[in-house]
């Protein structure tokens, strides 16, 4: 009886958390965030007396919700609303919030900074985007493996630096991403449970992205033999992961075919002749990683 009485003040939070999980699972991220915000506002007196472990769990879920909504509204071009949610996530994961578990706070801080980097990149504020991605990278480097997707941050940095014309530096980040992804894939054990296999699949998918981005950077650097080799590895990885009929497999194959055709044309031209600018079409200089950031990254973390 006494235990039931002691748990009674926490009941609204337990119910709100249960409702949050349900709404997130059904895709109602707005409703999920509203239900947690509502209980935290309505029960402020209880919040001040709550155990930090429970309060941390609520704050962690709220930070995930803010990031999810930020990326959702960014995808829908609602930049003002998107910025509001990212600012909320940044405030919630501030070091001054001593109620959050320190390790969880750092993980979510890195997620928030990564998504804010994507936010500012989306409308051309590249230097601001770079600052946020570098902040995410620093957190991940000192987290000793607790952050879930440092390779994703390197791929985002690769895409951003390439857009800024810093192709050698972009290539270095793609290489770092590939090393991390391959190490993660090799560390997976056949006896691991299904949910770990899902994480492995995600890593293997990103290996394709890393190879492709390295190919794009080598192409920018006029190292076409290296570019072709990495595009071919990207295609092999994509075939294994997604199959021959997947649009991405077909796009990468087209990229390989075009580069091989250009190489043949170059052999028939005067020695030392440069490829025309028309060769570097929009697809070649684009980066798949720019599309595999933000909400996908958060999705990987939440599972």
Image (cartoon, helix red, strand yellow):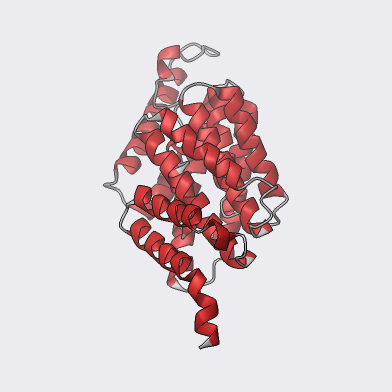
Residue 114, position as x, y percentages in the image:
56, 40
* Residue 128 sits above or below residue 213 on the image: above
Answer whether residue 230 is visible to the viewer in this image. no
Q: Nearer the viewer, residue 222 or 39?
A: 39
Q: Residue at 49% across / 52% down in the picture?
A: 41
Answer whether residue 243 is visible to the viewer in this image. yes
Q: Residue at 55% across / 34% down in the picture?
A: 117
Q: Is residue 131 left or right of residue 58?
A: right
Residue 74, position as x, y percentages in the image:
41, 34
* Residue 286 sits above or below residue 69 on the image: above
The residue most toward the right is: 142
Q: Which image quarter: residue 189?
A: bottom right
Q: Nearer the viewer, residue 130 or 93?
A: 93
Residue 52, position as x, y percentages in the image:
63, 64
Residue 188, position as x, y percentages in the image:
54, 66
Q: Residue at 40% across / 62% down in the picture?
A: 21
Tally the marks.
0
């Amino acid at each position: 009886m006494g235990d039931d009485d002691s748990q009674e003040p926490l009941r609204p939070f337990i119910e709100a958390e249960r409702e949050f999980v349900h709404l997130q699972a059904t895709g109602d991220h707005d409703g999920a965030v509203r239900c947690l915000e509502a209980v935290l506002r309505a029960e402020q007196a209880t919040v001040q007396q709550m155990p930090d472990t429970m309060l941390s769990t609520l704050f962690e879920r709220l930070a995930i919700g803010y990031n999810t909504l930020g990326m959702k509204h960014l995808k829908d071009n609602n930049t003002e609303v998107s910025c509001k949610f990212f600012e909320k996530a940044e405030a919630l994961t501030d070091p001054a919030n001593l109620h959050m578990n320190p390790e969880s706070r750092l993980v979510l801080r890195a997620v928030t900074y990564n998504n804010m980097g994507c936010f500012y990149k989306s409308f051309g504020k590249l230097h601001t985007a770079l600052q946020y991605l570098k902040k995410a990278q620093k957190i991940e480097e000192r987290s000793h493996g607790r952050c879930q997707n440092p390779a994703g941050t390197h791929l985002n940095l690769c895409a951003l630096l390439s857009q800024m014309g810093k192709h050698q530096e972009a290539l270095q980040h793609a290489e770092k991403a590939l090393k991390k992804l391959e190490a993660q894939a090799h560390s997976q054990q056949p006896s691991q449970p299904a949910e770990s296999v899902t994480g492995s699949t995600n890593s293997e998918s990103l290996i394709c992205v890393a190879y492709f981005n390295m190919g794009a950077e080598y192409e920018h650097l006029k190292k076409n033999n290296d570019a072709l080799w990495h595009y071919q590895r990207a295609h092999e990885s994509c075939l294994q992961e997604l199959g021959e009929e997947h649009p991405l497999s077909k796009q990468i194959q087209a990229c390989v075919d075009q580069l091989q055709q250009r190489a043949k044309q170059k052999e028939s031209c005067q020695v030392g002749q440069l490829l025309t600018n028309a060769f570097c079409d929009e697809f070649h200089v684009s980066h798949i990683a720019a599309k595999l950031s933000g909400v996908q990254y958060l999705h990987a973390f939440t599972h």
